[in-house]
Amino acid sequence: MQLNQIFPGVQRGNLRGDIYGGVTAAVVALPLALAFGVASGAGAIAGLWGAILVGFFAALFGGTPSQVSGPTGPITIVMAVIITQYAHDLRLAFTVVMLAGAMQIAFGVLKLGRYIAYVPFSVISGFMSGIGLIIIIIQLAPMIGFDTSKDGVVAALQDLPDLLNDPVFDAAAVGLLALAISILLPRRLRTYAPPPLVALIAGTFVALFFLNGAPVLGDIPRGLPEAQMPTFTSGEFGGMLSGALILAILGSIDSLLTSLVADNVTRTHHNSDRELIGQGIGNMFAGFFGAIPGAGATMRTMINVRAGGRTSLSGALHAVVLLALVLGLAPLAEDIPSAVLAGILLKVGWDIIDWKYLRRIRHAPREETLVMLTVLGLTVFVDLVTAVAVGVIMASLISARKLSWHQLSQLHIHPRGGAGSENAGSVVSLTQAEGDLLASANGEVLLLQLNGPFTYGSAKGMVQLLTGRGEGYKSVVFDFSGTPMIDGSIAMAVEELLQQARDEHQTVIISGLGGPAVEMLERMGVLESVPPKHRVSGRTEALELAIVAVTKSTL
């Protein structure tokens, strides 16, 4: 079997770039995987195996050729919450990871990848900024030589003043050194050595030979990880599903956003559903072997692309290189100070915060700013699931209200005489023939004209706007010929308006027969009270029928 059969797109011309990109991405991933493993509470080795397993299988089965996957800041924070929740039995925590992977595979099989991108930007911005703040807050204690609080962000903030009164100065020194290198490493040197790796090596060297009072990672398990069989308990299954769902959704969003970034740089097009399947397979393997989950990693992907990586070979090679490092260099990692990893993560947390949006917050729409700040606050001080759920609901309600205003502006009421229309927006004029027909009705025919799609957000407003407007008319024409779509809520609103017309003993004519809107009304049984002969395709024909009905009623 040839190499390009396993890794599609591999050619002799870009093989060198894929190799260089994979090796470079692995060098960058090493310190980050260690740091994310420690931050998750599962241990440094769990972070490394997460990078290996997710990185390899997501590359092999995913749909974004140049993407490099592994533990990320947002995924790590969610995993830290899950590990804290199931600290009494970590098998449950890793079962949640397996469930999340299975959900991602289901997302891909059901072709839901395109819909995940519909999560509002204000929700993503608030969530990511909240994650960045959480990383910064929980890494402050390790930065000065203490363990991270196991009781959450609020407890970590409460403990911080006491810890600052008695810091471990050796730890603080190497932590600040790592942070300074991560921020200040000259740009010309970044091309040859990524700041996290330089910070890791320099901080560890200083701690070993000059400041040996800084706490270190300590014993790291050797060899291959042990399998973690799925474990379920009836009392906790609901919470496990909830945790798996937020992990799956967040991992999917994180991965697909990185896929879009990779597309823009490489001028290619990823397969979002296949990408979700690949990420899901990787996370299932990660959970099975007790590793932390991962997603598409933007920084590592960009480093891979800039180094020449263009196919899935580079992502898989990055995982193989990490595997070699784990099997050969694990004893050396035991002497890495926790404060060094904390310094690296402080920079990661700072970068995750959505500073672009925050700088524009004064000029952003107030409703979107409210959603963003609400999600940020709930993410930091409540929990991640609540933050996302509340944010999506708030954003949906705000969007529905704005959409309602627009839709109601496309509801045109042509009153007596046919001269123009009453509506909240622009006037839609009738043809000369239609205007003459409406004028000839002597004020006995009312034309209600819907233009554009109408959805649930405008249903109540439509009923309120039209209630009582038909009094005194003998015929009412509902024109759906310009309506490409209505939903069930609008259908129920139309049924209420038809009932009002029947109560007024008015003749109802429906125009737009054969269009999707009238088909929806017929399918839901709304038009059962309207005789088939009063359902026509064109507005002109509907007005003619309405005038005939008026004439008959006056005889």
Image: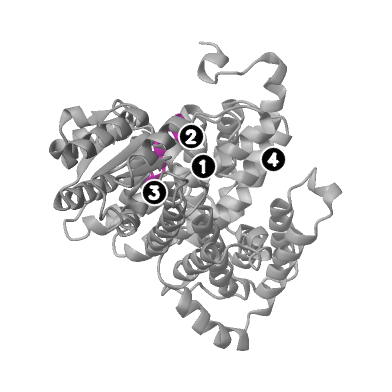
- Residue at x 19%, y 56% (from the top left corner): 233
Q: Nearer the viewer, mark 4 or mark 3?
A: 3
User: What kind of element bears circle 3?
Assistant: strand
Q: Residues within 10 Å of mark 1 (few under 14, many from 20)?
A: many
Q: Position of residue 465 (x, y in %)?
A: 34, 57
Dot 4 and dot 3 residues touching (CB under 8 Å): no
Q: Amino acid at mark 3?
A: Ile
- Residue 303 is marked as 4
- Residue at x 24%, y 33% (from the top left corner): 548
Label 2: which residue? 58
Label 3: which residue? 413
Q: Amino acid at mark 4?
A: Ile
Label 1: which residue? 255
- Residue at x 43%, y 37% (from the top left corner): 435
Q: Residues within 10 Å of mark 3 (few under 14, many from 20)?
A: many
Q: Nearer the viewer, mark 1 or mark 2?
A: 1
Q: CA distance from mark 2 to mark 3?
A: 56 Å
Q: Is residue 259 above or below residue 217?
A: above
Q: Residues within 10 Å of mark 2 (few under 14, many from 20)?
A: many
User: What kind of element bears circle 2?
Assistant: helix
Q: Amino acid at mark 2?
A: Ala
User: What kind of element bears circle 1?
Assistant: helix
Q: Nearer the viewer, mark 1 or mark 4?
A: 1
Q: Residues within 10 Å of mark 4 (few under 14, many from 20)?
A: many
